[in-house]
């Protein structure tokens, strides 16, 4: 039996083709996984066998995605800015309400002060008028006969009698004269004189 030997050249060629197929397959697999861009590397070879590399649209997708991300970012920033504006507007409205309340309180206080001042002036005017009237009546009574003056005093109520007598006594002291008040009291009925003297003692001064 004769055994025919196969030359080494075909075997080497077969191994090289196998290696090339394995390398090509590996590159295509890496291209599929997105690790390498094998189609661009093999584009001249693929063109020779009539295989055209497909046009990639990844750039368009990436551009649209980037634009969408920018839009979402701007929208988020605008939303945060609107929220901040709303918070500031609420603070301003709250501050305006506080200022309005403070202004209202100030107006009420000013009105109260005006009323108090008006009341004080009215009371002061009443006091001055009463003081002037008492001085005029006291001078009038001092200038008439004591009996006639006492008759007039007896027709007045106790407080008016007390105020008139005190005014007459003050006028006498200011003029350096002797007061006629004690003489008026001596001419009045004893009970009435005692009552007036007691009240003048209980509330001294005019």
Image: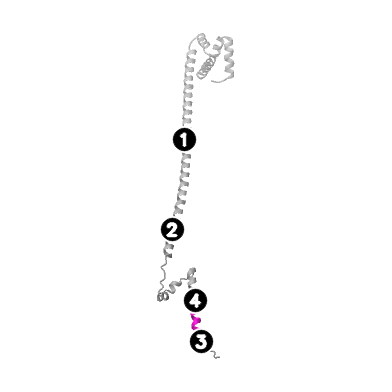
**CB within 8 Å, label 4 to label 1:** no
- Other-residue count near label 3 (Cα within 10 Å), few / some / many at <14 / 14–19 / ≥20: few
Helix, strand or loop: magenta stretch: helix
Q: Where is residue 58 in the image (x, y as percent from the top left)?
A: 43, 65
Query: Which residue is more in the foreground, 106 or 119?
Result: 106
Disc number lying in front (4 or 2)? 4
Mark with earlier residue (4, 3): 3
Mark with earlier residue (4, 1): 4
**CB within 8 Å, label 3 to label 1:** no
Query: Which residue is more in the foreground, 61 or 82?
Result: 61
Q: Position of residue 165 (x, y in %)?
A: 53, 16
Query: Which residue is under mark 2?
Result: 68
Query: Which residue is under mark 4?
Result: 23
Cα–Cα gap, marks 1 and 2: 53 Å
Residue 8: mark: 3
**CB within 8 Å, label 4 to label 2:** no
Query: Which residue is under mark 1?
Result: 104
Does 9 appear in magenta? yes
């Amino acid at each position: 039996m004769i055994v025919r030997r196969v030359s080494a050249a075909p075997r080497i060629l077969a191994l090289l083709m196998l290696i090339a197929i394995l390398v090509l397959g590996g590159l295509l697999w890496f291209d599929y996984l997105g690790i390498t861009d094998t189609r661009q590397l093999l584009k001249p070879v693929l063109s020779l066998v009539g295989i055209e590399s497909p046009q990639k649209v990844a750039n368009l997708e990436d551009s649209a995605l980037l634009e969408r991300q920018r839009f979402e970012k701007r929208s988020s920033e605008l939303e945060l800015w609107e929220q901040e504006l709303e918070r500031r507007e609420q603070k301003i409205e709250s501050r305006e309400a506080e200022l309005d309340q403070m202004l209202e309180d100030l107006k009420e206080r000013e009105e109260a002060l005006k009323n108090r001042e008006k009341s004080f002036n009215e009371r002061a005017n009443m006091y001055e008028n009463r003081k002037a009237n008492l001085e005029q009546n006291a001078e009038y009574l001092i200038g008439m006969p004591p009996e006639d003056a006492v008759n007039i005093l007896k027709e007045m109520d106790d407080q008016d009698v007390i105020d008139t007598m005190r005014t007459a006594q003050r006028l006498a002291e200011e003029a350096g004269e002797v007061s006629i008040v004690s003489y008026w009291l001596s001419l009045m009925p004893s009970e009435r004189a005692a009552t007036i003297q007691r009240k003048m003692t209980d509330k001294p001064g005019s």
